[in-house]
């Protein structure tokens, strides 16, 4: 049984997820902690819960999802894993932070790449990697079929979808990813999104105005 702890960080209101099992094996997904106090909040929680952190996982690497990645890598001596197709996005983060006047970003590099079909076992937690491009070229999501949830990043939100007006985005790819990957999951699957509140697959099939046929 996994515990999903959500933190909401930075002016972008990005959701960072800490997943851990009852034995304390853990991963951080999309550490978007920008300010030092946010980084310390996440780090202190990991220490207080006596968790053994195994990796930083990235659904994608837009700036608001990687603000704290290097901090977690350095302080907990863990690797960062992402999809290779998102490298151009990651390499552009420092420039975009400068452009937007966002201080404090520490550049980060991946240690390994994930692909669709990879299965990550973190203690008792089993996460399946699916490839869901559109919002970003190397966007992936993490599916826990046993516990019926998906950590979906910025693809599908509660009655909304991810933006596609950034460089290397594709609206048609995003719609295809949602229809063929997200909507192939059972209706009772919980969607932990990169922004806003949780939702379910069934709710979005019924009420998401961007996905009405």
Image (cartoon, grey):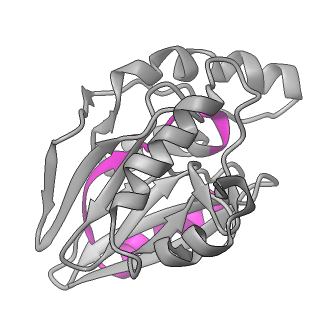
Instruction: Based on the picture, tell me whether residue 24 belongs to the magenta stretch.
Output: no
* Residue for point 16% across, 42% down: 117
Q: Residue 39: x percent and y percent?
A: 59, 57
Q: Relative to 166, is 117 above or below?
A: below
Q: Residue 170: x percent and y percent?
A: 61, 26
Q: Is residue 175 left or right of residue 161?
A: left
**The C terminus appears in which quarter of the rendering?**
bottom right
Q: Is residue 64 left or right of residue 4?
A: right
* Residue for point 33% across, 51% down: 76
* Residue for point 56% across, 49% down: 155
Numbered-mark total: 0
**Furthest-front residue in this view:** 213
Q: Relative to 122, is 86 above or below?
A: above
* Residue for point 63% across, 16% down: 92
Instruction: Based on the picture, tell me whether residue 55 belongs to the magenta stretch.
Output: yes
Q: Is residue 187 left or right of residue 54?
A: right
Q: Is residue 85 left or right of residue 23?
A: right
Q: Residue 6: x percent and y percent?
A: 53, 73
Quarter of the image for residue 53 reads bottom left
Q: Nearer the viewer, residue 169 or 211?
A: 211
Q: Nearer the viewer, residue 35 or 16?
A: 16
Quarter of the image for residue 131 reads top left
Q: Relative to 28, is 7 above or below?
A: below
Q: Residue 10: x percent and y percent?
A: 74, 55
In magenta, the rendered stretch is: 37-64
**The N terminus appears in which quarter of the rendering?**
bottom left
């Amino acid at each position: 049984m996994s515990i999903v702890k959500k933190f909401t960080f930075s002016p972008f209101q990005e959701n960072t997820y800490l997943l851990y099992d009852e034995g304390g094996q853990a991963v951080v997904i999309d550490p978007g902690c920008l300010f030092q106090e946010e980084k310390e909040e996440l780090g202190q929680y990991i220490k207080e819960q006596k968790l053994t952190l195994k990796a930083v996982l990235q659904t994608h690497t837009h700036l608001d999802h990687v603000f704290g990645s290097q901090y977690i890598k350095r302080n907990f001596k863990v690797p960062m894993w992402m999809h290779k197709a998102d490298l151009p996005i990651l390499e552009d983060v420092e420039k975009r932070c400068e452009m937007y006047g966002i201080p404090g970003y520490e550049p980060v590099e991946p240690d390994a790449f994930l692909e669709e079909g990879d299965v990550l076992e973190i203690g008792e937690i089993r996460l399946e990697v699916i490839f869901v491009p559109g919002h970003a070229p190397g966007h992936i999501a993490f599916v826990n079929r046993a516990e019926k949830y998906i950590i979906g990043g910025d693809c599908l939100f509660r009655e909304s979808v991810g933006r596609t007006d950034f460089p290397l985005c594709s609206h048609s790819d995003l719609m295809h990813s949602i229809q063929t990957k997200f909507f192939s999951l059972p209706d009772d699957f919980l969607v932990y999104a990169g922004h806003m509140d949780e939702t379910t697959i069934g709710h979005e099939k019924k009420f998401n105005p961007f996905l009405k046929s």
